[in-house]
Amino acid sequence: MIMYRAPLRELRFVLEELLQASRLAQLPDFADYSSDVAGSILEEAGRFATTVLDPISRSGDEQGARWTPEGVVAAPGFRDAYQQFAAGGWTQLGTDPDFGGQMVPQVLVTAVQEIWGSANLAFKLCPMLTHGAVHALELTGTAEQKRLFLGKMISGEWTGTMNLTEPQAGSDLAQIRTRAVPEGDHYRLFGQKIFITWGDHDCTSNIIHMVLGRIEGAPAGVRGISLFIVPKVLVNDDGSLGKANDVRCVSIEHKLGIHASPTCVLAYGEKDGAIAHLVGQPNRGLEYMFIMMNAARLSVGLEGYAVGERSYQRAAEYARTRIQGKPPVAQGDGPVPIIHHPDIKRMLLAMKSTTEACRAVAMYAAYQLDLANHHTDEKLRVAAQARGDLLIPIVKGWCTETGNHVAGMGVQVHGGMGFIEETGAAQHVRDARITTIYEGTTGIQSNDLIGRKIGRDGGVAMNLLLADMSHELEALDASDPATSATRQAALEAVGLLKDSTQSLLKALSARQDAAMAVSVPYLMLCGYVMGGWLLARSSAIAAKNLQGPDKAFYESKIHTARFYASQVLPNALALARVVQSGAESVVSTDAALI
């Protein structure tokens, strides 16, 4: 079985050379951060992923989590792996030092989360959701709530969840019916939640559920939604565990992939009502939940290319060792490894270049969030927040859609063997499929992008980003011929995105359904163009370092960017045409004709 190896050199290139994240050490909150610190964390994360998480990914897929009347039993090996994960301090990364966390930049957390997602996506989902719950409590919880819950969630002793969806509601949270009845200083909760990732398990002694519900008498729709803390096991004032709360896992779903991640149906209040604690102010629950949601959208976005990276590694190794056929130009008379066949090379380069482009865009977005949350200049913070907000739906939508495509190409590289479970290639296709759905489908992301992020400010944040992209590309040293070609292709693509953005803004002002009809193509266009911009910058950096000890690495960066510019970035031309003239074919068609 082909083992996962964390792409440490690539991750450090994006951190240190492309983004120059070491500049964050100039900010007071990151005074202890350095390239050496980042390198040590990444190396240790890679070791843990290879030796602990990757070996149980296949068995977790085959055996999965198991429901019992007493609760969910984690897949074999997962409980022990989680204990090692928590003991290693990984749950503390990027959380509040006042409660035992380790303050590091989000861009580094993003790099580490990629490693977990590549090695074992089903495992990675558990600490991801805990991290989101922790972040929401850090920003909106009372001092008492933080005292009771944050320390043990950050240490990994307890995990956390997000509880939004209900059987009748789906993505329409206005339809939530979970009912909260006031009782003294707390509430009694009654209702059912579905699709709750890691909603029950035996890896920790407690699970802290963050649950959306309605206080009796609250307004209808999203205006009446509140957020509640509902522990699986009640917590005493001294932090010790009390009796079980009135919450039960009724069942777990039988899914296409991520079998080791229990997706639970949770029943609240089958007896006297689950004890619940209000977070923040009544009727502001959706606002608070979006703190968790935005963190999760970035994290799920990187899951798309993380699975793509794993699929690429598996496919590339198979192609190097599978002997079959003779390409048109080859040395010798016998068959050769299939990696020498032109179409296999094309697919592997497509997998590699698209994954690198996604990684660059996602980590650039995370870097903007670091500036937004920690920079000392308020004007810069506001600008970085606007850019980070703009990029989140693009990262979530584009990186997961392309991650699915990359995983599919991984099966194709294997040929018939890819369709056989024993090679492991099929698991990546099955696991990646959920990423385009988690935390809002691609359509929801694209509507958020054009409605809330572009329409609301009239395209100001997008136009500022486009101007920066053009300026940076024009300023690149293009003396290297390959870099020059990549730069030119990227500039042309930025022009297409500029024109398409103006077309979209006109559609938004004239007919909203027409804009929504091309919102996904527009989101994908953004992703491809931004990926081309960052790979062109990467190529220019690499061209300056060809004389050093990492010559082969930098040569690979140049060739990968060149391939992306010539065979992947042309997708922008087709998508721009759809955005500018494809809406009418949707809005003019009666649903009865479909």
Image (cartoon, rainbow, N blue to C red):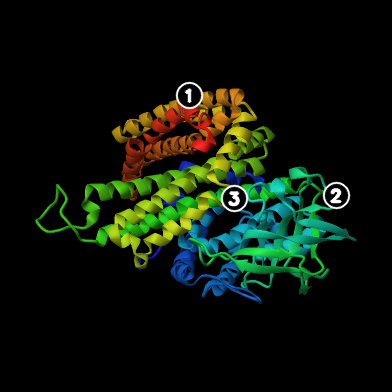
Q: CA distance from mark 1 to mark 3?
A: 30 Å
Q: Position of residue 136 (x, y in %)?
A: 70, 52
Q: Earlier in the sequence, mark 3 or mark 2?
A: 2
Of tags 1 and 3, the one toward the viewer is: 3
Q: Which mark is residue 217?
A: 2
**Residue for point 33% across, 60% down:** 418
Seen from the viewer's position, the closer of residues 452 and 464 is 452
Q: Quadrant of residue 223?
A: top right
Q: Quick check: can you spot residue 294? A: yes
Could you tell me residue 226's position as x and y percent?
Answer: 77, 51
Horizontal placement of 405 versus 320: left or right? right
Compare marks 1 and 2 and give the one earlier in the sequence.
Answer: 2
Disc 3 versus disc 2: distance between alpha carbons? 28 Å
Q: Which residue is mark 3?
A: 439
- Marks 1 and 3: CB-CB under 8 Å? no
In the image, residue 164 above or below residue 202: above
Q: Name the spot of residue 103 as percent of width and height, x first.
A: 64, 54
Can residue 157 be seen here?
no
| Residue on which the image places disc 1 | 499
Pick out the residue farthest to the right: 184
Q: Residues within 10 Å of mark 1 (few under 14, many from 20)?
A: few
Q: Are marks 1 and 2 in contact (CB under 8 Å)?
A: no
At label 1, the amino acid type is Asp
C-alpha distance separating marks 1 and 2: 49 Å
Front residue of this view, candidates 105 and 290: 290
Query: What amino acid is found at the position of numbered circle 3 in the picture?
Result: Glu
N-terminal of the pair, mark 1 or mark 3, is 3
Q: Residue at x 60, y 68 (%)?
A: 86
On the image, the x and y values in percent for residue 496 come to 44, 27
